[in-house]
Image: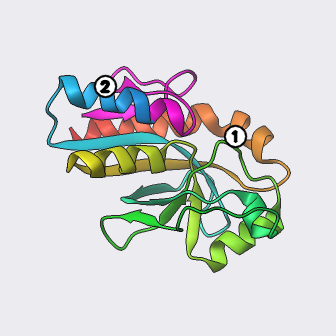
């Protein structure tokens, strides 16, 4: 089963699950209860904390969920830090917020976290709870700095075209 966030990141070959952390968990769960896929492939774009370049193509099965305020010791959580992981691959951080501080991006890199995508942690968490293998295909649209949103908008269409070519080529 191929899934994507939806809205401006929709693909004719993928089921849209929603944007952020909550909607994908709800909608993917509904899909899985009504279908019986053997594997989930999430396709989307991502921001780079610095190790990947714009339009790089990245495949991974690892995600975590850390809020930027944690990097500045401005918050705490009773939830244990965890990485939903299947293999040794790049780690994607998911949050309902996009990082725009280059110093915080460096802190993520120090933790071994290289990419940012709002939905992927939810996708992997739901897949794991159903015992289904999952992975993500991402194209980098921006760096996580003060220009993150501007660069995302500027590069989004080309990144989608790269994803479409990659997925249709894998079929």
Is residue 88 positioned above or below 126 on the image?
below
Is residue 102 positioned above or below 2 on the image?
below
* Residue beneath disc 2: 30
Q: Residue 130, position in %: x, y?
A: 23, 45
What residue is at 20 percent from the left and 44 percent from the top? 39
What residue is at 57 percent from the left and 36 percent from the top? 20
Q: Residue furthest front?
A: 78
Name the magenta segment's main secondary structure: loop
What residue is at 80 percent from the left and 56 percent from the top? 145
Judged from the image, the secondary structure of the residue bearing numbered disc 2 is helix
Q: Nearer the viewer, residue 9 or 156?
A: 9
Q: Quadrant of the C terminus?
A: top left
Q: Residue furthest bottom?
A: 110
Query: Distance between the Cα atoms at labels 2 and 1?
Result: 30 Å
Between discs 2 and 1, the one toward the N terminus: 2
Q: Residue 141, position in %: x, y?
A: 63, 46
Residue span colored magenta? 1-24
Q: Nearer the viewer, residue 154 or 3?
A: 3
* Residue beneath disc 1: 152
């Amino acid at each position: 089963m191929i899934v994507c966030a939806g809205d401006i990141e929709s693909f004719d070959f993928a089921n849209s699950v929603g944007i952020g952390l909550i909607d994908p968990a709800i909608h993917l769960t509904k899909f899985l209860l009504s279908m019986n896929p053997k594997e989930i492939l999430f396709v989307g774009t991502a921001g780079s904390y610095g190790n990947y370049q714009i339009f790089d193509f990245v495949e991974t099965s690892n995600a975590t969920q850390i809020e930027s305020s944690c990097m500045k010791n401005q918050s705490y959580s009773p939830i244990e830090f965890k990485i939903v992981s299947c293999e040794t691959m790049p780690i994607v951080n998911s949050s309902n917020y996009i990082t725009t501080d280059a110093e915080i991006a460096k802190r993520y890199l120090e933790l071994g976290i290289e990419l940012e995508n709002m939905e992927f942690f939810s996708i992997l968490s739901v897949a794991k709870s159903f015992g289904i293998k999952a992975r993500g295909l991402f194209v980098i649209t921006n760096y996580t700095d003060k220009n993150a949103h501007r660069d995302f908008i500027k590069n989004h269409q080309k990144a989608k075209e790269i994803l479409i070519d990659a997925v249709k080529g894998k079929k």
